[in-house]
Image (cartoon, helix red, strand yellow):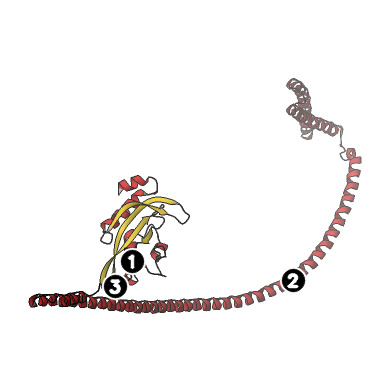
Amino acid sequence: MNPLLNRLGGVYRDPNRVDRDASSLLKSSVGRHLVPNISSLVENNGDVTNTLCLKGTISIHFRAQEYQQLMDIYMVPGYPFRPPKCYVRLASNMYLKENHPHVGSDGQVYLPYLHDWRPSSHSLIELVVAMSSVFSADPPVFTRVQPRSSPPPPYSTTYTSSINRNSGTSQSERDAIAQVQEHIILEESRKEAECQQRVRDEEAQRKSQAEWDSQNHASTKEKVRRKLVAHLQEHSSISQKEIQTGMMDQKKLKLSQERVVKHLASLTDQENELEEYHKRVDEALSDIENLVMEAQERKQTVDASIMSNIDDMVIPMSAIDEQMLELSTKQATYTDVLYFLSNALHNHSIDLATLLKQVRKYARLQFLARAHLIKISQARAASQNGEHYK
């Protein structure tokens, strides 16, 4: 098998699977009469490909007799993902049966096993068994009786005329000739009887074949009727279930529609309430806006009055208090100056030398203001305690 596959080259994607399946079939009992060979296969699109072909015969049993049916099994390119192609071949005086349910006019075999072919579950051995079973029930070929040639003229006439013309023949010779003539007549009668018997047997065979075809047709018709009835019953059952399901869905939809209508009415009432509430909220917002505007106007008036009299808001009670207020103001001013100098350095508005110079200046002034405030605070505390502050 391997030399044939090597000659085919890259026809098969999985040559090991082809070798394994073909070898298993050839070693089995159903494929012992098959021989591997390389043959050309013509595809439906017209492509011609050299493929591995198993040629030979498979056994079929018809009317308690075993026959060998000529077959060609082509391992098509793409096997095992594509099913093999099988052809019925004819011997001499053999003809394909017309309108065979599983064999075409070109001899190609069509079987459900080939139509449902799966690489993982189907095999060549099961294919041959399926073909043997189908062809045993309905053979794809038949024979025709060859017309018989006209029998030769009887020898009795010739011998009789010879005897009549030759009157000088002895009695023993005439007896021998009569015996030969009688033997020839008996032999012709036997052959004629055999021919008639053969004709009757063939006629009986044709009648039996016709009866078997009629019974097979009736059986097939009954099977089709049963399958059709079963299919219609199943379809009727499914339709009834679908109708019942549809009616239940219709009831559910009707209940859902009623609930939706009630919910819409409730939403409409809520919408009216919300619109009324929205009107009241708008009125309240309008009143609040008026109050805010009045408050802003009053605030602006108060701020203006405060800004105009800011200096009159703090009135020191004595000269010391006035001095402390002035020193506190200076200290806060120096703190702000130091803050803005730091921001100026951060924003690269001044350099570090200028910053240090100004910081030393205002830090000194701030220190003096704080020291002065501390002395004044100590002096006031001493005067309140009756001590003399130095």
Label 2 secondary element:
helix
How far across and down, in percent of the image, does residue 347 sit? 75, 29
Q: Nearer the viewer, mark 1 or mark 2?
A: 1
Report the residue marked by disc 1: 94
Task: Give the residue displayed 85% in from the left and 56% down from the top.
Answer: 289
Quadrant where the image shows the C terminus: top right
Report the residue marked by disc 3: 150
Q: Nearer the viewer, residue 313 or 384?
A: 313
Local crowd size for mark 2, using a 10 Å CA cut-off: few (<14), some (14–19), many (≥20) = few
Mark before the other along the chain sequence, 1 or 2: 1
Q: Nearer the viewer, mark 2 or mark 3?
A: 3
Given the image, on which type of amino acid does mark 3 rest?
A: Ser
Q: CA distance from mark 1 to mark 3?
A: 24 Å
Report the residue marked by disc 2: 268
Label 1 secondary element:
strand
Mark before the other along the chain sequence, 2 or 3: 3
Given the image, on which type of amino acid does mark 2 rest?
A: Thr
Q: Nearer the viewer, residue 158 or 195?
A: 158
Task: Give the residue displayed 17% in from the left and 74% down from the top.
Answer: 162
| Callout 1 touching callout 2 (CB < 8 Å) | no
Mark before the other along the chain sequence, 1 or 3: 1
Q: CA distance from mark 1 to mark 2?
A: 90 Å
Q: Quadrant of residue 351?
A: top right
* In the rendered image, the vertical position of residue 247 relative to residue 369, given as above or below: below
Residue 376 visible: no
